Image (tube, grey):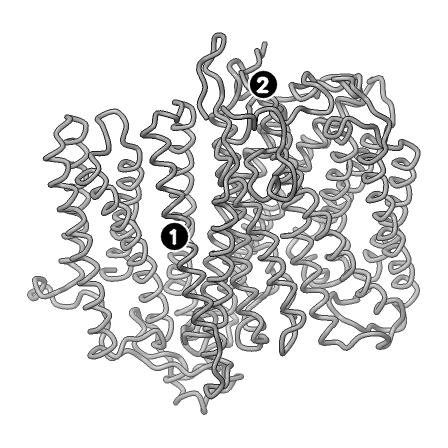
Amino acid sequence: MGDHHHGPAKGLTRWMFTTNHKDIGTMYLWFSFAMFILGGAFAMIIRAELFQPGMQLIEPAFFNQMTTMHGLVMVFGAIMPAFVGLANWMIPMMIGAPDMALPRMNNWSFWILPPAFLLLASTLFMEGGAPAFGWTFYAPLSTTYAPPSVTYFIFSIHVLGLSSIMGSINIIATVMNMRAPGMTYMKMPLFVWTWLITAFLLVAVMPVLAGAVTMMLMDIHFGTSFFSAAGGGDPVLFQHIFWFFGHPEVYIIILPAFGVVSQIIPAFSRKPLFGYASMVYATAAIAFLSFVVWAHHMYTVGMPIAGELFFMYATMLIAVPTGVKVFNWITTMWRGALSFETPMLFCIGFLVLFTIGGFTGLMLSIAPADFQYHDSYFVVAHFHYVMVAGAVFSMTAAVYFWLPKWCGKMYNETMGKTHFWISFIGFNLAFFPQHFVGLAGMPRRIPDYALQFADFNMMSSIGAFIYGASQIMFLYNVIATIVAGKPTSDEKVWDGAEGLEWTVATPAPYHTFEVPPAVK
Amino acid sequence: MSSPTSGEYEAYYVPEKSKLAIFATIGLILSIYGAASVMNDMTFGDPDVATHSWSIFIVGLFVFVATLFNWFRITIRENIAGMNSAQLKKSYVLGMFWFIFSEVMFFFAFFGALFYVRNLVGPWLAGEGAGRMNGLLWEGFEYSWPMMQTPQEAVGGAGAQPIANNGSFTSAETSMAFSDARAWYAWLPMWNTLILLSSSVTCHIAHMGLLDGNRKKFNLWLGLTVALGIIFLGLQIFEYYEAYAHFGLTLNSGIYGSTFFMLTGFHGFHVAMGMTMLLIQWLRSVRGGHFTADDHFGFEASSWYWHFVDVVWVFLFLFVYIL
């Protein structure tokens, strides 16, 4: 068996040649944080330009590149890999498995990510500039009118898709095949459940995205006419295919976040999760509905009225399972012995702000109302409430929650709480006013705006700078914990936490379960 | 890597470190960078300036294919050496199943595009649908499928187009659709269908042979399957030649050419992949004596893949050639 069972190898090759789920999870997490900083830097440039009306710092063309790259890097580089990293670290420990089911492929699905993003980021320095057509890359902006760098963008999307598909196949195989004896499906921690369903969504829709970018590639270089009406195709076809991927994609981002919150809230309420089974069914229902609501992103393209109505009602239905979840989280806290450590604070922040984002989503789902809100800053406010206060807040909560288990050291609680409050205030200052400017008619993706939006935009920019700066504090806290945090060897770092991951030693040994644990 | 059972349950499989992922990454990234550069040279580049795009692509592809070859070789050797636990074998089965599911979804995108264009976009471009202005944009365009005249040609070419011109598209002279019931025997897609469906049957007979422990039967019928796959691909290439040389049907022939070549092309690529997979299994059995009646997932996975491309073809035959 060799001595690889006793601990990690030394040096760089440990990371390059590893097949260990914890190493790979760690690499995913650090990589996603690096991308979070990069995407955040793009956001800071955007907010700096929008600090005042008029053109200050950058050219409009570069502004478009910034909005595009910010979205792509945050969605594909920061949030998705962060949750994959968390899945890598936690799923084997939560279900009593020694590792992921297919460990070598696991390493490959990580390692193709950094070069793919290097390729994507390098388009900023190419002739004609980086992609500037928005992260949704609608044709014909992304075909006929795209800069030459679009070809590299297309291939990097292919690689990201490949990475996601392999990662997801691995997660599905792990959950279906590697559970410890006695760990039935309905005993799995909710994080494992949400990831199983997310992985299914990924395997289902990433190939559709690959199809969309392949059609773009063919239109650009080989004379096909998928997205050109002159040849009998339709630019709107692109939007249908993109959003058939894109809507499940937003649940791919938020379902693991639901899983994280469902682990943390019970731990700090010192009560089991309320309505476990209904949480599972609600997750499955959301995933199913996500396939039949895509066109609510395109109410204004001129669909037949029957289509508008179908997609409107189907979209509103999603509020029901989502409401079940919010109800269950609140009921879990009801009469619990609550305490408010940093992970719990981020989860409560998630709960409040994600629900606001959910309600604005419900507003946007109403087709006639959406004709007013469409492509305005109201939409920007809406999806940042679910992406940042939803996905990123829960991810931050997860890092604080499991960091002591990962490295056997305790983070600085005061600094963690400060990080939460600065994030919370900065985030709301940045994005709450955007609802107002959006409703008042400010369009998204513009480098300049009318004078009446000046005050709210300045507030927004200040809030964004505060939120951005608070992430430096987060980074510092994590590094300080790893380097010089207060050692802890309690198996249960949090007294209310339940699950197999809290039964192993702290810090978690390099190989967790070499024989299956007993699950009651 | 595998270890004796300890306690009540079999001990888990914990793999060693592996360089495979890094080499596969280097190969993949070089080949996609090269491929993208080749395309950009073609579309945006200066033909007088020499670039290294092709070399990068070929080197990358070589590294990628060599690594994957080695990867599968290692996996096969581990299995033959008895290192794979029943649990790991099941992980491979699950992995293959979900991989094929992702392939199904890839084809779904292209079939979806075909249905959307045929049922909605075509009639809309011809002016149907309440409140639509397309009839004014593309005056004289009449929709039929296969689309033998693009909207652009209907208004008199790219120059006469009333909206921004984003490409010029020709129209096919002859379509690939079924036209003459009396000459069915001269219709190539029908032969292709018969060949591919038969190859699924021969593949299944080979599997039965293997389950019976009859290696001769397995080798014979699997070899026949591979041969049928090669014939199918040959006929597909002949069909493409005919399309370009005599039918005026090219990638540039509007949406009909786009959907026809992308659907049949990706299917043909998958047939080539499946054929290669089966060929390797055949070589393993003939030369290496691999596979037993109860341990032959390498073959079974390839046969699943083969049946999958077969089913895709049935849909292609229906929606691209017949209906």
Image coordinates for residue A146, horizontal then vertical, percent? 58, 75
Q: Which of these two is toward me, B261 or B72?
A: B72
Image coordinates for residue B13, horizontal then vertical, percent? 48, 25
Label 2: which residue? A187
Residue A215 placement: quadrant: bottom left
Residue that appears at 47% across and 53% down: A208
Q: Which of these two is toward me, B240 or B111?
A: B240
Image coordinates for residue A19, horizontal then vertical, percent? 54, 36
Is residue A143 rendered to the left or right of residue A497? left
Asked which secondary structure carries label 2, the reply is helix
Q: Which residue, as the protein is rendered here, is positioned at the far bottom?
A: B159
Residue B319 placement: quadrant: bottom left
Residue B66 marker: 1
Q: Which of these two is toward me, A142 or B157?
A: A142
- Residue B8 lies, with reference to residue A309, above or below; the image says above
Residue A197 placement: quadrant: top right
Chain ID at mark 1? B
